[in-house]
Image (cartoon, rainbow, N blue to C red):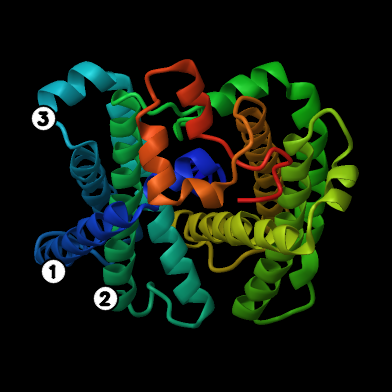
Amino acid sequence: MLHRMALRVLPSLTLAVTEDAVRRQKRIVMFVPGLIAFGVYRLAQHLVPTTEPLVLLAISSVVAMVTALLAYRVGRAAPWSSIVSQDGLRLLGWLVGWIGGVYGIQLSLLVLTLLWIMHYSYLQHPDGPAMMAIIISCTSVARDAFEIGHVRKLSVLGRPFLTFPDGEQLRLLVQRRAWQLGPWAVVGMGIGAMASLSGAGIDDAHNAALVQLLSMTLLAGGLALCAYLGGLNPSSSWIQTLRQTTPAELLKYWWWPGMAFASTYYLVAMGLVLFVIRQPGITLGIAAVMGAVVAAMMAVYGYYLGYRRYVENEQAPQLSSGMLRCPFVMGILGKQVGSPKGVGVEWSFEKNGTKG
């Protein structure tokens, strides 16, 4: 789900996919696949045992893969021949396999686990949760694939993006700055393991899972915020950056992507245990392992997002994202894409990284 965070945290990507025309088209792109997914689920009920978790996840994955490819095509706004020649099979393979298949399964597990915590278990009442898992997964994949396709379209047209949401820059960051990421990951493992033990002593499995989820959401989300501030200003302490950032900005990033995705990843991990491994509950040992992995991941992702924001700040002159949202300003800057100065000006925002 790193692509989702990048699309909403990095200003260059956010401004590209939140324009009014893009929003209107995106609503349609999400609505139509949702209806189709409902029909596919109803048909699958007569052909395969949808009450089996692995069968349900396989259906969700296949539907999401097809949806990702078609939604990307809509966002890309180009014939298939041009898409294949310009984007390459590697990008399309990542889109179908990761944004479609893997991401679709993650979203389905997220839905099933949330309903399980609320005492509406798919294993006891399969029809409703299964239908929601497929539809919500399909519509979310359609949204993200469309946005990625739109970003790629703008990139081909000459609009520069320093970060493409395919995770390639994360791999490079791990290779080049492992010494900076390592401590954050280690701290995350400790915090995550401790947070997951918060459910100890609670007999009811659903209530224990809810307490663990809340603890992970708060602590791992807070760690992701601190790591983000560390990446945002790698030459100084994250504490110094924390002091220079307004409380409103801190709360915003703590909530999203910090707490939002810490809870999301933990729910997905719980779903793997409950519906794939088929464990009746979450033991303390399993909870500690899940918490350690999720918190470490959130710390690394937080640092990565902050660092990519830092890179964009350093390579663009100062111009607020509020100004960039003005159609008049964007129209002027759009005419300058061909020149080196125009490219720099088009993707600017507040240099201290605490605005926009």
- Residue at point 48% right, 33% down? 346
Tell me, yes or no, whether the two marked residues, 1 and 3, touch with CB atoms within 8 Å.
no
- Mark 1, secondary structure of its residue: helix
Asked whether, in this view, residue 185 is left or right of residue 213, the answer is: right
Q: Disc 2 and disc 1: Cα gap in Å?
A: 10 Å
Asked whether 234 or 227 is in front, the reply is 234
Question: For the residue carrying disc 2, how many other residues have a C-alpha within 10 Å: few (<14), some (14-19), or many (20+)?
Answer: some
Q: Position of residue 106 (x, y in %)?
A: 43, 52
- Residue at point 32% right, 35% down? 95
Q: Amino acid at mark 2?
A: Asp
* Residue 284 visible within the image: no
* Residue pointed to by mark 2: 127
- Mark 2, secondary structure of its residue: helix
Q: Earlier in the sequence, mark 2 or mark 3?
A: 3
| 183 up-or-down from 344: above or below | below
Q: Amino acid at mark 1?
A: Arg
Q: Position of residue 82 (x, y in %)?
A: 15, 22
- Disc number lying in front (2 or 3): 3
* Residue 117 visible within the image: yes
- Residue at point 43% right, 59% down? 109
Q: Amino acid at mark 3?
A: Pro
Q: Disc 1 and disc 3: Cα gap in Å?
A: 32 Å
Q: Disc 2 and disc 3: Cα gap in Å?
A: 38 Å
| 48 up-or-down from 185: above or below | below
* Residue pointed to by mark 1: 42
Question: For the residue carrying disc 1, how many other residues have a C-alpha within 10 Å: few (<14), some (14-19), or many (20+)?
Answer: some
- Residue 356: which numbered mark, if any? none
- Residue 79: which numbered mark, if any? 3
- Disc number lying in front (1 or 3): 3
